[in-house]
Image (cartoon, rainbow, N blue to C red):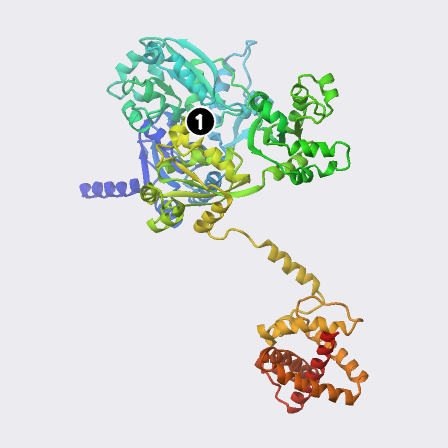
Amino acid sequence: MADKKKASNMARRKQEIQLQQEIETQEEWEDIMSKEGLYVVDVYQEWCGPCTGLVANLKRLKNELGDDLLHFAIAKADTIDALEKYRGRCEPCFLFYAGGVLVAVIRGANSPMVMRTVTEQLQQEHKVIDGTAERKEIKDPYISMVDTMDDMDEDEEETEEGRPASKKDGKQMRFKGELVNFGDENDRSQEAKKEVTVAIIKPDAVQAGKVDEILAEIKTQGIEILKQEERVMTEEEATNMYTHLQEEEFFKDLITFMTSGPSHILVLTKGRTGENIINNFRDLLGPTSVEEAKEKQPESLRAKHGQETYMNALHGSSSEDQAMRELGFFFPDYVIPAAEGKPKLQRTLALIRPDAFKLHKEEVIQMINEAGFKIALQKEMLLTKEMAEDFYKEHKGQEYFDELVTRMSSGPLMALGLAREDAVEGWRGMLGPKELDKAKEEAPDSLRAKFAVDDVMINQFHGSDSEDSAQKELEFFFPVQQTMAVIKPDALGTKDEIIEKVHEAGFKIAARKETTLSMEIAKEFYSDHKDKDYYNDLVEHMASGPTMFMVLSREDAVDGWRSLIGPTDPEKAKEDSPESLRALYGGDILKNAVHGSSNTERAKDHIQKIFGDLEEPPKQEQAEEQEQEAEAAKTEEEKPQEEEQKSTEEAKPSEEETPKEEEKAPEEPPKTEEEPKQEEAKTEEESPKEEEKSEEAPKEEEKKEEEKKEEEVKQEEEAPKPAEEEAKPEGEGEAKTEEPEQQKTEEQTKTEEPTPEETKTEGEDEKKEEETKTEGEGAA
């Protein structure tokens, strides 16, 4: 019986593991932290086991959502160094990690809250990946409280003055089981500290003389070295450092190795906030195993400089908690610098006019880069005289206008979109005064003074004078476009990095789709290459696996994207444009990571093939709004009634005839091409006809009718249908006027001839009168 129960438990355990990945080592923990998606981790200890009460609900939720970004895991705190602070606590704890960052924590088996949080955080992660939101990292409040209370216990023993410190001086305390914050300014400032990581260049790399090379490689990735120290670890320090590996067979050898010579201890960060530095540096390190690193990430530091498993050249913190512990371990007195607020970047237009562009382009570009500007947009172009006049139309009438237009259209110029916190004022400051004499006198180092051209009174540079002007001027030189961007199957594994660079370059992703192309669609997509030798190989490669298609929007998107991806051949890209996407992620000409449309026409064609029509019909909506305003006095019932009454063929001649009738009645206001409503139609039809009857004598009417009949006989063979069509609406209109009670019946049946013979006769007579009148107008 006991064996059966044990077997049942093992079977149930196996089923749970299929849903929840089981994490038991630090390496496995680091692995899931490096992967994309939302990980919901149930932290447990061996003596109490994971929470099984929610497994059924989690499985149901997983099946309902069917989202590949959602992962469930159980993690044993006993053997995972990053979860050390969760040991000794039996309360169920669910940690939500997205992109290796803690985004939510739930304590207790609160099923509704766990389910709701999974859904909310999954939606948020999709927005982060799409670039429409930012990931919000949090700290586990319970662990923060424990850390604070530990600090308070240490401070309570003795302060600098030698007196006990009150626990009220602490920043967090528990009151009736709840965590209460009493933070002051110093505590709140901790939230604004930069994120850092600790790195160790191990003795093998130090002894091999690799330190300077490794430091250079770290810096080329934009990583800042905040602190660096060379030291030889003691056995006690090494043992404490690697306590999570003490059960491994190589543990003693590892301790011996780490104490065999000097190591370099580094504190690293990146950018203004240090955000994601831990994951970024671990990506640079590569896998722990040197053999695996050489196979999967040959450009990683461990692949280049490591020797074997524990002699892998470098170490990097695996989590923020570990980084803080290692920082306190090696540099207990080090104060992490405050994070700098995210700057609000401005953009401005910069023009290097033809003379300066021809003579000093490279020097000017260098000065722009040295001034801290980012060149977000760049284009060499030749303005026509008309384009120059249009751009400077506000200056028309000034005595310098003609010369300005002439100089601007005299040869190629360079248009730049510059980005910096103070781009508008910063660029205008570099330019100096507009008047050359004043620039030379007051700002001799300014661009306008330094690169003035002899015998030319027009200065050689232009800069926007405000943010509004910058936006308009940028749109003049860099019109907003859409282009097709493709991440090919060979680079789909790096799509997150590529998408990040897409956003960094100022592109907006208007649409995206990940799909595997069929051979037929791949052939159609690359139909313009069908005469090339590589066509078949290209088609087979594009159909070999999932491909990411994106519609990118930005000023000058087509050229901007092609500039970002670089030359077709990745080897050439590495030489000419080492920061381009093909240089970074491409393998060879066929597997060159990404693709971009070559011009706006092909971009439209490719977008249509993959996404269909993405454009919204704003013009149609505006037309509908205008129509509603123009017909505000007409009821909603009349409009559909008239639409039911008249067929499409009848509507056209009616629209054509209405203006002619109105010419005979100047007191009536002119009508639009919209079909008149019933009451207005009646008035317009009756009024001119009554006037016609009162003004013309019966004899004249008979005479004109006879002439009209003769004319109809002559034109019958040439255009019988229009004559019939003209007769129909008039006849129907009069039928409605004479027989209002039959109006509804006539509209529903849509008969061509009214049933009463009397109405028919009257309709024909008045039709003839109207035709006679129309002939007279035509002759006039």
Near mark 1 (Cα within 10 A), the count class, few <14, some 14-19 or many ≥20, is few
Q: Position of residue 308 (x, y in %)?
A: 27, 19
Residue 111 vs 737, above or below: the answer is above
Which sits in the foreground, 77 or 567?
A: 567
Type of amino acid at the residue the image marks with label 1: Asp
Which image quarter: residue 343?
Answer: top right
> On the image, numbered disc 1 is attached to which residue?
576
Vertical relation: 241 (above or below) 721: above
* Residue, far bottom: 757
Asked if residue 136 lies left or right of residue 204, the reply is: right
Counting the numbered discs, the total is 1
Q: Quadrant of the C terminus?
A: bottom right
Q: Which image quarter: residue 213? A: top left
**Does the image show residue 747?**
yes
Q: Looking at the rendering, which quadrant does residue 617 occupy? A: bottom right
Please indicate, yes or no, whether residue 104 appears anywhere in the rendered image: no
Residues 523 and 371: in front is: 523
- The answer to which of 185 and 680 lies nearer the viewer is 680
Q: Nearer the viewer, residue 648 or 207?
A: 648
Estimate the x, y position of residue 426 in percent, counting from the top left.
65, 25
Counting from the top left corner in percent of width and height, residue 491 is at 37, 36
Q: Which corner quadrant holds the N terminus?
A: top left
Residue visible at 55% across and 11% down? 163
- The residue that appears at 48% across and 33% down in the rendered structure is 564
